Amino acid sequence: MVHRVAVIGAGPSGLTSIKACLEEGMEPTCFESSDDMGGLWKFKEVSEPNRASIYRSLTINISKEMMCYSDFPIPSDYPNYMHHSKILNYFRMYADHFKLLKYIRFQTLVKSVRKAPDYSRTGRWEVLTEKKDGHEERHVFDAVICCSGHYTYPNLPLKDFPGIETFEGKYLHSWDYKGPEDMYGKRVVVIGIGNSGGDIAVETSRVAEQVYMSTRRGAWVIRQVSDNGLPVDMKYNTRFVHILFQLFPINFFNWFGEKKLNAMYDHTMYALKPKHRLFSQIPVINDDLPMKILSGAVIIKPNVKEICGCTVVFDDGSTVEKVDTIVFATGYNYDFPYLPKKAMYKSGHRVGLYKHVFPPTLEHPTLAVVGFIHALGAIMPQAEMQARWVTRVFKGHKKLPSSQSMIKAVEKDTRNIEKSYIVSKLTPLQVDFVSYMDEIAGDIGVRPSLLWLFFTDYPLFKRVFWGPVTAYQYRLMGPGKWEGARRAIFTQFDRMYQLLFFILSFIDRFTGLFNLNQENS
């Protein structure tokens, strides 16, 4: 019987894993190598080795209602797209509300996780930790949840850039980037067109002499602000849209989505048009990049062919001279250095985890990975769903299939991923947000029943079916049911609009521009 659980990492995945353990009556101990919670979202002026790192201006590209935990809505006075400082504050409120802090051991590094001598009989794990002062300690746990994330180890493929050793300027990975202060008046090349690359190109273009953005295959760029000013994920991430995707061929949605995006700005004219279709890779989310391209502040270039001193040569033969800085926004490598290599199953080019959570070849289901996933949606609700499932499995309320069945499922998943998405660093982690949430929720027994809602609570059915798939939907029924879930769904747009209304009211108070204080005649 699982009772004592080690949780590795006190970021968004670790916090919700602690809470899930407590809800199932288990005793969690969370080991966090830094001096604070938050993981990726804890900003530090200097990047620290073997830890995630973010830049000073980072704002999340998922709206607050779509990113919050299922039983703890983000306050109404928080903006819809939050700066990293607001996100960290939200985590602090979450930890305080559910009394999670006392289970976290800060400045404690997990050096290794190994099978205990009696593992074959008990499924237990031996965890070796090291305190800041160098003191080591061995612990034995009934189960382990790994929540160390996948933005820790920068991928810096210098061998793919001939002549980099001759570069006379400065180069860095986006992991090291904190702000544009060192870019004033300089000529900058940003390599990579993911979300970080787009953000860095836009920000540095405000102070640099010129910014060039190099991309191997282009990208589809979408805006955070959709029709009528709604957050784009609140408008399109609905069950209705999800059902349409199941009914019609994906090429129809590729055609329709690309047509809609090109109506806003022609991706060919902006030199952005990728070699892949829209839904073959998660798009770049950036409202400002097209304007920076249009104004000439950012110039899109193809892949880098070679570097000669301060000159960068591109695949099309064009060159950029007198380059001062190169920023590699080339993603991250994934690793679990504290785990035994044999604990992880390799499936093609990815770590093969059953439903992105459980290693399929272990004798006992007492090791799980939470938050090792990537979708067009925030990690918080997905990690929470995984943690709820993991703890139900640990307690014996849910059983996993046989090892052979899980391996077959992993291999099938690998084939589907490789068929659906282009191969990149994030491909092994990629899932469809609604499909994945519903799949894991079904395993737990918390997936909302549309038929039941239709006959028993039609007003709620309308909001669940037509509205955004927020995490509150997975607290309406089953284990972990939250009495506030229905109200949270009914008021989610109120929380979205409240800050906007406050800003308009403030402006109207001094200008009378919107006539908000006039009574209706």
Image: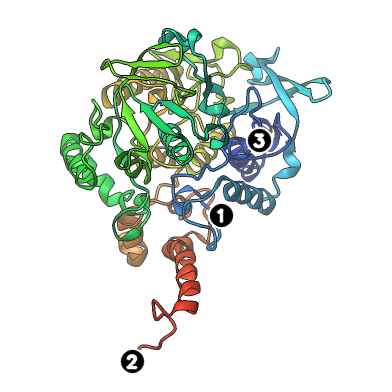
- Vertical side of 301 occupied by 502: above or below: below
User: Could you tell me the amino acid type at mark 1?
Assistant: Phe
Q: Which residue is mark 3?
A: 45
Q: Quadrant of the N terminus?
A: top right
Q: Which mark is residue 72?
A: 1
User: Could you tell me the amino acid type at mark 2?
Assistant: Ser
Callout 3–callout 1 Cβ contact below 8 Å = no
User: Could you tell me the amino acid type at mark 3?
Assistant: Glu
Q: Which residue is mark 2?
A: 521
Mark found first going from the N terminus, 3 or 1: 3
Q: Residues within 10 Å of mark 3 (few under 14, many from 20)?
A: few
Q: Position of residue 367 (x, y in %)?
A: 58, 24
Q: Depth-wise, is mark 3 or mark 1 nearer the camera? A: 3
Q: Position of residue 246 (x, y in %)?
A: 22, 40
| Residue appearing at x 75%, y 34% in the figure | 106
Q: Secondary structure at mark 1?
A: loop
| Residue appearing at x 43%, y 65% in the figure | 497
Q: Nearer the viewer, residue 133 or 175?
A: 175
Residue 422 visible from this viewpoint: yes
Q: Secondary structure at mark 3?
A: loop
Q: Nearer the viewer, residue 65 or 325?
A: 325
Q: How is the image coloured?
A: rainbow
Q: Depth-wise, is mark 3 or mark 2 nearer the camera? A: 3
Mark found first going from the N terminus, 3 or 2: 3
Residue 461 visible from this viewpoint: no
Residue lying at the far bottom of the rendered structure: 521
Mark found first going from the N terminus, 2 or 1: 1
The answer to whether residue 329 is left or right of residue 261 is right
Q: Secondary structure at mark 2?
A: loop
Q: CA distance from mark 3 to mark 2?
A: 55 Å
| Residue appearing at x 37%, y 38% in the figure | 297
